[in-house]
Amino acid sequence: MLFRAAFPATAPLPRFSRRRAGASLVKTVTGVHSRTMARDIQERIKKLIIDRRLAPGAPLPTETDLMELLGVSRNSVREALKALQAMGIVEIRHGFGTYVGPMSMAPMTEGLAFRTVAGHYRGEDSLLQLLELREAVETGLIPRLAGQVPEAALAELDELVERMAAEAAEGAVRADTDRAFHAALYRGLDNRLLSEVLDAFWEAFHRVRTDLAGLGADPRVTHRQHAEILAAVRDGDARRAEQAVRSHFDNIRRRLSSSGQK
């Protein structure tokens, strides 16, 4: 009775269409092939940039030239260039051509920020994880700066700490002042890639923190902690500098925990 209720005698039993299944399989295989081909074209354009030692801002061959070089259609070239533009590897200037892009950390920043926000709303401690990533990098690097920062950079850092003091007196240290301090401090390592990675971490963390609401920082504590970091670096005390950075991150971590953000 149960079988008949589920499949009445008047209704034909369900059948699988071989033609439909075959068409579906062909469509799947074609899609996989198209994606593989698209990735291959992207890799070949990237190799061209490397082989020709093209710097950011340098023009790429025209679409027609790329079609001939790669042996693919115009549409395939355009799709590959669009994908590479999303990665910051090329820049399409409509009416002018395609150029080597800035190759910035912007895609990484976007990915970090989105991943952290999405994780937060799934109940994960993603903001704390991002904070720990920043802390691990900065505490590992700060001892190398102790006693090694040139006077010109120290003068810039002094100005930023003074600006923090003035802003704290008005009620809040500006995020861009905080960012400028960290950028100026680690610029002393003379490693452009490292500076860009640190800036990407900072940007992602603060953008997410803004999206999820402020943390109620005490501006006087923010000023005092940055002043202590600078003093330790100036004195050449690596251990003290590392501890000052850890204290700074501990303060942020406590505020995150007390606000209920993860």
Image (tube, rainbow, N blue to C red):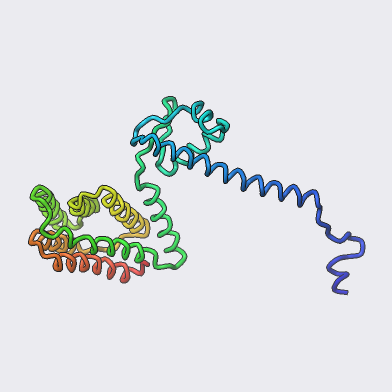
Quadrant where the C terminus is found in the figure: bottom left
Above or below, comparing residue 259 to residue 177 in the picture: below
Q: Please report the residue visible at 74 percent of the width from the left and 47 percent of the height from the top.
A: 23
Relative image position of residue 221 (x, y in whole percent): 17, 64
The residue at the far right in this view is 10
Identify the image quadrant of the N terminus: bottom right
Q: Is residue 193 above or below residue 247?
A: above
Residue at image position (43%, 36%) is 48
Q: Position of residue 164 (x, y in %)?
A: 15, 55
Q: Give percent across and percent down for residue 7.
A: 86, 66
Q: Nearer the viewer, residue 94 or 238?
A: 238
How many labels, in total? Answer: 0
- Side of 256 where 146 appears, left or right: left
Left or right side of 135 for 156: left
The residue furthest front is 51
Q: Residue at x 32, y 55 (%)?
A: 201
Q: Say left or right for 192 vs 150.
A: right
Q: Residue at (62%, 45%) from the top-left corner?
A: 33
Pick the residue in front: 224 or 195.
195
Residue 51 image offset from top left, x and y in percent:
40, 37
Please state which of residues 256 and 107 is positioned toward the viewer in this rendering.
107
Report which quarter residue 235 is drawn in: bottom left
